[in-house]
């Protein structure tokens, strides 16, 4: 049985560089009726626990360490025993939110996470954050992009720890090489496809960030 994807939206704030903004975040749960992983434990651990509905949580995968994506991770881990996984390049961002709590494991480019018989390949896609990753699930025809790629363009690169040329290189090298029908499930807002976003790359470059 192939894993299914459950979708939860949680609300809270994002803070960095002295500013704070209200945001809605997509939380993605991949698994079956008995086990699952959570991609981005955003804002509300109780809401994520409710959505899990008693399933064993095998891992909490962080697409990057901005506070709106990892704020609830330690609480969710404490409630479930699941390990929090983060790319090591995002440790400085993580420490801004959780200075007294470290992730439990590291993510690496090319690493494969398996849940409910379904593989998710880790793609290191720096730019929005140094340790930003996407998770590609070919059997599900989808890629979870965090804040690297959205409907209409790349993630923001105007704040600390981000870089526009780097995110363009990540999108070009790691995401636009995926099949065009691949569904892009983002960290905020609506989903899209690789094929819908590919034609806009040169426009993104010309506009900058």
Image (cartoon, rainbow, N blue to C red):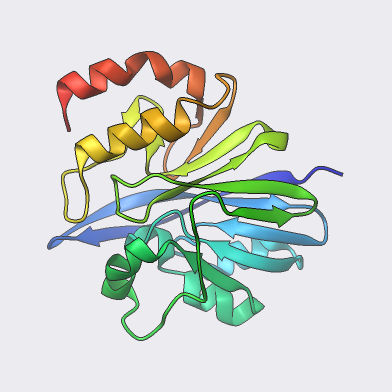
The residue lying at 39 percent from left, 44 percent from top is: 125
In the current view of this chain or complex, which residue is farthest to the right?
1
The residue lying at 64 percent from left, 47 percent from top is: 120
Rendered location of residue 102, percent (x, y): 42, 79
Rendered location of residue 53, percent (x, y): 74, 63
- When asked about the image quadrant of residue 156, the answer is top left
User: Closest to the observer: 111 or 55?
Assistant: 111
User: Closest to the observer: 13 or 62?
Assistant: 62
Q: Is residue 54 left or right of residue 21?
A: right
Q: Quadrant of the N terminus?
A: top right
Q: Is residue 91 visible?
A: yes
In the current view of this chain or complex, which residue is farthest to the front?
110
Q: Is residue 150 visible?
A: no
Q: How many marks overall?
A: 0
The residue lying at 73 percent from left, 55 percent from top is: 115
User: Closest to the observer: 16 or 95?
Assistant: 95
Q: Is residue 21 left or right of residue 144?
A: left
User: In the displayed structure, would residue 188 be above or below residue 182?
Assistant: below
Rendered location of residue 184, percent (x, y): 52, 32
Rendered location of residue 199, percent (x, y): 38, 13
The residue lying at 29 percent from left, 32 percent from top is: 168
In the current view of this chain or complex, which residue is farthest to the bottom?
100
User: In the displayed structure, would residue 138 be above or below residue 105?
Assistant: above
Q: Is residue 200 left or right of residue 112?
A: left
Q: Quadrant of the C terminus?
A: top left
User: Closest to the observer: 137 or 14?
Assistant: 137
């Amino acid at each position: 049985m192939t894993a299914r994807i459950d979708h939860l939206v949680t609300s809270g704030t994002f803070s960095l560089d002295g500013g704070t903004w209200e945001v809605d975040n997509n939380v993605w749960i991949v698994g079956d009726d008995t086990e699952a992983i959570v991609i981005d434990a955003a804002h509300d651990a109780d809401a994520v626990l409710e959505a899990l509905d008693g399933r064993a949580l095998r891992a909490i995968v962080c697409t990057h360490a901005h506070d709106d994506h990892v704020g609830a991770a330690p609480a969710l881990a404490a409630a479930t025993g699941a390990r929090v996984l983060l790319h090591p390049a995002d440790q400085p961002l993580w420490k801004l939110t959780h200075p007294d709590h470290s992730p439990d494991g590291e993510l690496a480019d090319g690493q494969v996470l398996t849940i409910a018989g379904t593989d998710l390949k880790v793609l290191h896609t720096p730019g929005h954050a140094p340790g930003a990753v996407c998770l590609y699930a070919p059997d599900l025809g989808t890629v979870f992009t965090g804040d690297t790629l959205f409907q209409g363009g790349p993630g923001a690169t105007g704040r600390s720890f981000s870089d526009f040329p780097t995110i363009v290189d990540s999108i070009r090298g790691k995401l636009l090489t995926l099949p065009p029908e691949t569904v892009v499930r983002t960290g905020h807002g609506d989903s899209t496809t690789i094929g819908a976003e590919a034609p806009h790359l040169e426009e993104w470059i010309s506009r900058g960030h």
